[in-house]
Amino acid sequence: MDKTQAIRKPIIQAAIIIGIFYAIEVAMVYLNLFPDYNVLLLADIVLRIVMGIIALVLLRPNKALFTNKVTPKMWLVILPFLIYVALPLAGLFFAGVHAPRDITRFSIIIGQQFAVGFFEEAYARGLFMKGLLKFNTATVKQRLCTCALTGAFFGLTHMLNIFFGENPLYQVPSCIVWGFFVAAVYMLTENLPLVMLLHAFSDITPRLAQGILGEASNPAVLKVTDIAGNVLEYVILPLAAVYICFKFISLKENVKRS
């Protein structure tokens, strides 16, 4: 298999997987196959796990993708993202109510987000970047291209969420920028469980806050955290991704030496 085919084949496979996933999701929702919403969420979890496993089978990951070490310096690079993930929880300190209204549904939704992290990272980082990581990281330009292409693919696939009432004008740009950063983290660490967990918790903390908050007694604080989150997402995280692309070799050597 030549270089072009080695890069293109997993990208096509990732696109097919996400296409099949959305076809099944749309059918489940619009044909009302699961009238009970909790059952629909459970079906979604099963579907994501199955499609994620298929992506991993196609990826044929080696053991290193699950065991590669993340050094203290690497955690410093990821720190802005950890702050971004934790920000929604700040509202818990200014809430009027501290109990979810429907504990069963709330628990299922939290479980669903772990399935989201597993599935989306399996196809959008693991499989999609398989050939790119092997053949397109030698120069800064190649690394920027790899991360930008991955982020664009990840963001554009979320355009299909318009079928489920999401606003693509907001979600797609957000996912492109977010995906650019996570692609850079994965390129550097080549640790698939790490990006799966980062993804899952970035989706869980806003839902955790919404599910527990009730009415916030200090809306101004929540407004500040919302603005801070936007600055982190649209400014700090992209800059961190660019930094990884430029300092990739020295950061990678640091990982190998540790």
Image (cartoon, rainbow, N blue to C red):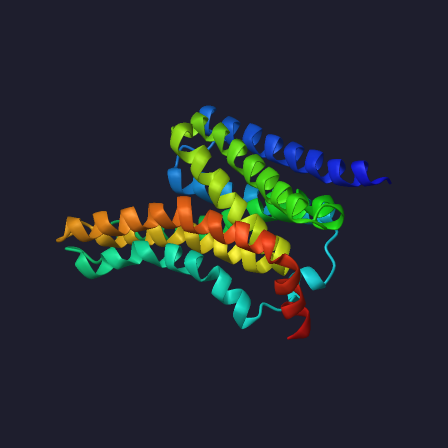
Is 148 placed left or right of 198 in the picture? Answer: right
The reply to whether residue 65 is visible in this rendering is: yes
Q: Position of residue 139 (x, y in %)?
A: 69, 49
Is 247 placed left or right of 160 in the picture? Answer: right
The one nearer the camera, 6 or 108, is: 6
Count of marks overlaid on the render? 0
Quadrant location of residue 79?
bottom left
The reply to whether residue 53 is visible in this rendering is: no
Q: Is residue 157 above or below residue 69?
A: above
Is 128 placed left or right of 157 in the picture? Answer: right
Q: Position of residue 52 (x, y in %)?
A: 61, 46
Q: Where is residue 74 in the image (x, y as percent from the top left)?
A: 54, 65
Q: Where is residue 50 in the image (x, y as percent from the top left)?
A: 61, 45
Q: For the N terminus, which image quadrant?
A: top right
Looking at this view, name the residue that lies furthest to the bottom: 258
Q: For the C terminus, which image quadrant?
A: bottom right
Quadrant location of residue 3?
top right
The one nearer the camera, 113 or 5, is: 5
Q: In this view, does 24 lie above or below 49?
A: above
Question: Which residue lies at the image location 42% right of the left edge and 35% below the top edge?
Answer: 171
